[in-house]
Amino acid sequence: MPILELNSVSKRYGALTVTDDVSFSLEEGATLGIIGPNRGGKSTLFNLIGGTDRVNEGAVLFQGRDVTRTGAADRCHAGIARSFQIPHPFVGMTVFENLLVADAFGTTERHAREDRCRNILDQTGLLPKANRPAGSLTLLERKRLELARALATDPKLLLLDEIAGGLTEGECKSLVETIKSIRDRGVSIIWIEHIVHALTAVVERLIVIDYGKVIADGAPADVMALPVVKEIYLGIDLDEQAA
Amino acid sequence: MAQLDLLSTSRGPDVTRLALIGVGLIVFVALAAAPFWAGRADLRLLMEALSFLALAQMWNLLAGYTGLISVGQQAYVGLGGYLFFALAMFAGIPVLWAIPLAAIAAGIIAIPTGWIAFRLQGAYFAIGTWVIAEVFRLIAAQFPALGGGSGISLPVALARSIAETRGGREMVMYYIAFVLAAGAVLAVWLLLRSRWGLALTAIRDSEPAAASLGVNIRRVKFFVYVGTAMGTALTGAFIFLQKLRITPEAAFSVTEWSTFVIFIVVIGGLGTIEGPIIGVILFFLLRDLAADLGTWYLIGLGALAIAVMLIDRRGIWGAFRARGLPTLFVTQRTLK
Ligand SMILES: Nc1ncnc2c1ncn2[C@@H]1O[C@H](COP(=O)(O)OP(=O)(O)OP(=O)(O)O)[C@@H](O)[C@H]1O
Ligand SMILES: [Mg+2]
């Protein structure tokens, strides 16, 4: 049974169709990358899967269960976690407290588990900042906090929205290692990223979204070789980038 | 402000915090002993200020944390007052029991009322709460037994039942006001330190993120709506016990119970426990200074609120906080 299934999902904002009849499914434990031009509707897809926004048409199934009308909190409890492209830290709390929210409300455990939070902060490199106000973090640290909070909900499916942008080569490598280790624990991952070589280092499948439509879906090397994709990613050669 | 910065960096925030706690304790003790040092007029003023502090803490919890901007909390001040009069006068319930019972009854009424108000979003919610309060006012005027549109006075015998002497009554009344205000501050503080506090602060800072991390926003908001309705009604019941007379206009006054309360919270600092305290002090100081100015006082108050929002939306306490002043009511959880 697939962990996630999208059946002919559409989303409109007024006259603008942002998600246009999108269908795909993801197997349990699989990793999927999403690329595509700016404003193509990638983040909107995460809003529809995560439940912060509702579809106009179509259905979203999680582990075979129809969650189309389910709220974001309940989808989180079901096992979906996401990072926001534009970070949404709880600025009035410390970094540690940000994780406590995820730990106390995102999991079935009703008591905060400090050690778990500590491990996740350590894994995401935020431990030295644990007791600092989240409002004092830099943009890159805020992105790491997005990842840390998502992990603290104990997800089965992790949605990552452009968390590698702005990283140095070394930082990007260590992020890739972190995401690989999450994958190796059996967590299914969908990752939206413009930095294609980081993406292809982790995912086994790639989807291209343009004007709200899926225009390509397949193994990363095959997808990147398609003429339509080459056109969009003009000048970006996958092999060259990876080298 | 620059001076304050120096203060906190050169001597360390711990010293400033200790000084703050010291001031807080002195004020607390002085208030607790007020009947023994304050004159009759001062005591009345303090009682009123303490009532407003309780109302401000409730409105701040509602608006400052859940973002539910209500301009209709007078619905619950009035409801608390009227239910108190009804319970004490017609159900024969002892006066001091009728106050909490009125609050509980108001909480029960807040459940269907909230259910209706929650159909509305943002500005519509604000307008909706005001409309609901107006409806409550009109309904309150429909009961001839409660004086209809012209209101009713509490029978002397009932007032006497609190204490035989006037001095004794004032003492009891003052301590009710004191417990209400201190209780409101303490309740909000304990709530913010609990698991619920995490959810409330998360909702205040980002609703989409809070929801995505498993916080059931509607449930939290509804709980806070009903809880603050009860706290507001509790205070309302006391306010009209103290006034000994209730009319629909006074009970459901939007100026008194919404406008003034909102000024207090906004000027002092929305979304903080200390903000409403600072706001109440400032509000009553200003009112005292501007007693003869009438309408100009209201205009000045409005101008001050706008100025605060333009200069620093976080209000006076928020501005001091941003410049390094430590909090008095610590809610932070530390990873050791
Ligand atoms: N809540 C909203 N209301 C109106 N329009 C929206 C809303 N959310 C997104 N859009 C519009 O939908 C389109 C797609 O946005 P989306 O953020 O999904 O694109 P994206 O592929 O993630 O882009 P990027 O690569 O820049 O992150 C944009 O034109 C955007 O302006
Ligand atoms: Mg995006």
Image: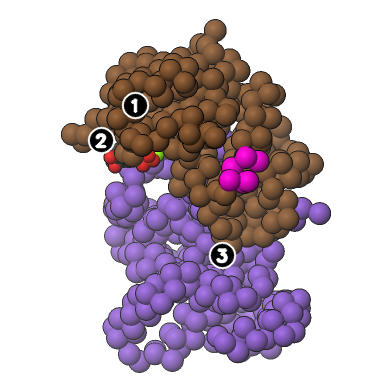
x, y percent for residue A176: 61, 35
The 10 Å Cα crowd at callout 1, few under 14, some 14 to 19, many 20 or more, is many
Query: What letter labels the chain drawn in brown?
Result: A
The reply to whether the residue tagged 2 has its Cβ within 8 angstroms of ligand 1 is yes
Q: Of the two numbered discs 2 and 1 on the same chain, state the one appearing first in sequence.
A: 2
Q: Give coordinates of residue B79: x percent, y percent.
A: 43, 54
Q: Amino acid at mark 1?
A: Val
Q: Which residue is mark 2?
A: A13
Is residue A114 part of the magenta span, yes or no?
Answer: no
Q: Which chain is purple?
A: B
In x, y percent, where is residue A97? Answer: 66, 50
Q: Do the residues at discs 2 and 1 belong to one chain? A: yes
In the rendered structure, the residue with mark 3 lies on which chain? Answer: B
Magenta region: which residues? A169-175
Q: Which residue lies under the disc numbered 3? A: B272
Read off the residue under disc 1. Answer: A229
- Tell me residue B80's x, y (percent): 48, 55
Q: Quadrant of residue B321?
A: bottom right
> What secondary structure characterizes most of the magenta part?
helix
Q: Looking at this view, is B69 or A174 the one in front?
A: A174
